[in-house]
Image (cartoon, rainbow, N blue to C red):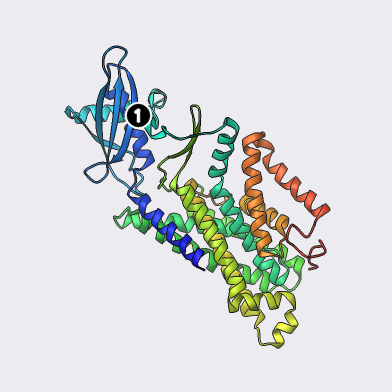
Amino acid sequence: MIALRMLLLALLLGLAACQASVDAEQARVCRQALPALNPDGGRIGVQRIAPGTRPREIRIDYEVVPATGAPRDRFAYCLFAASGLDPSKSELIGVTTETGIVAPATVYFLRRFYLGSPEALAADPGLGEGAAGLVELPPALAYALQQAVAGLPKIATFGLLAGAYAMVFGLVGRINLAFGELAAVGAAATTSGVAIMTALGTADLLAGLGLGLVLAVFAAGLHGLVGTGVAIGWVRSSRAALIATVGLSIALMEYLRLVRGPIEVWVPPVFNETMPLARAGSFVVTVTPMSLFTGGIGLLAATLLLRLMTGSAFGRQWRAYADDPGAAALFGIDGGRLLNRTLALASALAGLAGFLTVVQYGSLGFAGGFQLGLKALVGAVLGGIGSIPGALLGGLAIGIFEVAWSATMPIEGRDIAVYAALIVFLVFRPGGLLGWKHGNPRQV
């Protein structure tokens, strides 16, 4: 319990620290402006990037090394139209250097015709001295480390969805194929929360993300409780219930398309300051605070779920009913109420997975949840779909497998490889890694 509280405290402190950091999109735009501010040429080396003296402003200290002559230390203040979750936060509206304020007309032409162009991207001086003094790693190890830290959000998402599958199957022996769409519901609710805070005139990061998180968990939990409660709780036949969840999946997909429209709405990237970790020559291993945050939230949610299932009255009732529904009923456990609570909690986990997807990648389309849920189901089967710890382990394994395949093999064959792994496990170990003792799946 102490370790859990320390993990939660570290996440909160890290999130608070991230709010005071420099936005990576704004830093990139300001870095791209530096070559245009030095038309005489020379190599530009960034020394420090920090918040400016005014809101929505950052300062870059850099060094210009000309072909002939002594190096010159310079700085630039870049002022932006907005900050936080506002879509216009990367719009440069003012520049000040050590020689004075740059003319507004120059800033306009800089923004209109140069920033974001291929020439500006090629001339970006990069991290500069921020990447100096790092641990030097072999190229293969540095590449593997980069892939590992980049895969943290995906691993967290697969783990949460796999745990949701295991909660329902472990209790009643039925698979809910709509968890991917429930994640999409959570993603849509997250976008709505950010939009509400922006419409109210505030782009505060913590407020926007906090409202998005609450709406994602609530919306997915409510939709899952109502929809899945009908598809699983009211249908007596297991095969009919499976087909009903397929129908629910399609219905939720079309429902999201009608409510949101076919055009995806993107949440601006936040907490995306690039932090160097190590290097291999010119290759720098980096990670963003948001990647660490999403990975940490996934770990925290999985830890809380395991704690809930082992140390609470709900967990004891769940285990008793999963082992013997008849005996559990004799001891006063209401199976219908327990199923509803399980469906709500599992759906909330799916909504949390949708939230993590949006804050990390920006969006999750109305049809994007299907593939996500299907791969998480593969992870749940690999780990042992009747076991919540096994399903979490299987989600972790699928996330690592996808990252490793994408880094070393043609990405076109990644999905085929994932489903082929499922076939292999179903043949040789159908009970999964931590499934039923005899390696056989639960009879449903």
Q: Quadrant of residue 347?
A: bottom right
- Closer to the camera in the image, 440 or 361: 440
Please state if 212 lies on the left or on the right of 91 as rendered. Answer: right
Q: Residue at x 55, y 52 (%)?
A: 366
Q: Quadrant of residue 430?
A: bottom right
Tag 1 secondary structure: helix
Q: Which residue is drawn at 64% across and 71% down?
A: 230
Q: In which quarter of the image is residue 193?
A: bottom left
Name the residue type under label 1. Answer: Gln
Residue 379: where, in percent of width, then height? 68, 54
Q: Against 416, is 2 above or below?
A: below
- Closer to the camera in the image, 28 or 105: 28
Please state if 439 lies on the left or on the right of 128 as rendered. Answer: right
- Closer to the camera in the image, 242 or 312: 312
Q: Against 78, is 430 above or below?
A: below
Residue 236: in sight, yes or no?
Answer: yes
Q: Residue at x 29, y 11 (%)?
A: 68
Residue 235: where, in percent of width, then height? 71, 72
Q: Name the residue under label 1.
A: 32
Q: Residue at x 38, y 27 (%)?
A: 124
Residue 255: in sight, yes or no?
Answer: no
For the C terminus, the quadrant is: bottom right
Q: Against 203, is 78 above or below?
A: above
